[in-house]
Amino acid sequence: MAKESIPPPNLHGINPIRNSSKKFPCGRKLALILSAVVFVVISSTYYPEHVFYGAREPAHNSQQTAIAGDEDNEMDCNLFNGTWIRDLGGPIYTNMTCPTIPDSKNCAKYGKQMDYVNWRWKPHGCDMARFQPQLFLNIVQGKTLAFVGDSIGRNQMESLLCLLSQVEAPTKVHSDTKDKFITWNFRSYNFTLMALWTKFLVEDSQREINGTLVESHDMHLDKLDARLAANLHEINILVVSSSHWFFRTNYLYEDGELIGCIYCSEDNITSFSVISAIQRVFRTAISNLNSRRESRLKLTVVRTATTAHFENGQWNTGGACNRTEPVGEGTAMTSTIEREIRDVQVEEANRAQKEKKQKGGMNIEILDITKLMSMRPDAHPGIHWNNEWMRGYSDCSHWCLPGPIDMWNELLLAVLNKYKKNMEDQ
């Protein structure tokens, strides 16, 4: 079991002095001097100048502190604009203290060097408190929160399970094949946590050729995913995300009629870009969520697209993610299309926010994590030889647990805290 635990930080081959007063004739005074020298050497090696990507803080700290329990402070600054800075405090859980950690995200178990956990997100102009699982459970007590989207959304749910399990171990109450639709319950808080797996948020069916399924889908842009629609009546808080499955040959329908396609070569079919299809899907999804009178939905959070950090190829062509530390803001690894996806997701969420002010309806917020995660190519599982569904390939899309994905839930807590009074009347 010891080899599965998170190792201590690698101090670049420099070992602290132990029992120095017994080894040197000058005694304890000389030992303290030598210890100080070692500390300076370690600091200059372990905290190189280039890791501080933002401007250094002034000597007089006049900044705000965004604390999850303080609604006013936390939403005054832009929590999504900042840098990753060194923090040796470590995460609030490890792969040994999370009872629900999936094997595919258990990076410590398979020998990944764990320095990537020694960073924290630092918004410009304010600080964020560490995740407070007790506060989170108090806010969501008696409610149901669902992550709706592809496996990256499920990855965020897995992170939240690990974080909250430090207060209470959850009970799995439902799971289907490959955990695509899974439900957990925190009994002491009557809190239900769901993952509803869907490729596109809207209805789809996979195409077949001669009885064999192919990587191509029929998407109905005007129909909400049936499984999501069937479960909306019991969901209070919804975290919505989707983007990765659009990068295939997909055929688009409205009112049952074929209106176009993505990445297809037929001359008689209108060609749609990935961006335009994603925008239509998010508009359909948000509009449908807001118009359902029977829904108990109080808050929808749109989580923006994340970066897959494959380099020198893709997952099936030798691509890998071998970096060992974050990159700076100026070199954030976000492609043009990922930025465009993020922009249309934000645009549709903002459109819904304006309609909410004019017509009422559910609250909607944005979890804008595209830029901050583009700086973290170091925190993917990478090669997973023991993982059944990625055997022999690099996983540079999902995120290790613990890891920077835990910050998504810290940001989610800030959003929930903003609306906690609004949700109390349920």
Image (cartoon, grey):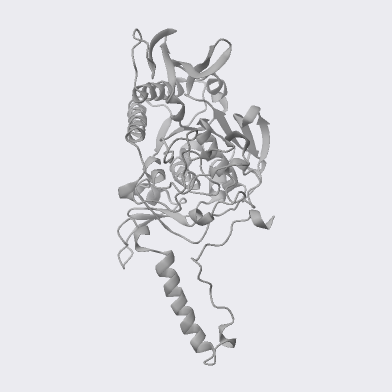
Residue 192 on image: x %, y %: 61, 36
Q: Residue at x 55, y 47 (%)?
A: 401
Residue 375 placement, left or right of 140? left
**Foreground pick, 274 / 285:** 274
**Foreground pick, 122 / 351:** 122
Residue 113 placement, left or right of 50? right
Q: Residue at x 45, y 79 (%)?
A: 36
State whether residue 29 is above or below residue 12: below
* Residue with the most extreme right position: 1
Residue 202 on image: x %, y %: 47, 20
Residue 154 placement, left or right of 188? left
- Residue 5 occupies quadrant: bottom right
Residue 378 in view in this figure: yes
Residue 426 in view in this figure: no
State whether residue 31 is above or below residue 387: below
Residue 228 on image: x %, y %: 53, 23
Q: Residue at x 35, y 46 (%)?
A: 332
State whether residue 138 is above or below residue 282: below
**Foreground pick, 413 / 3:** 3
* Residue with the most extreme bottom position: 25
Q: How many marks?
A: 0
Residue 206 on image: x %, y %: 52, 17
**Foreground pick, 104 / 243:** 104
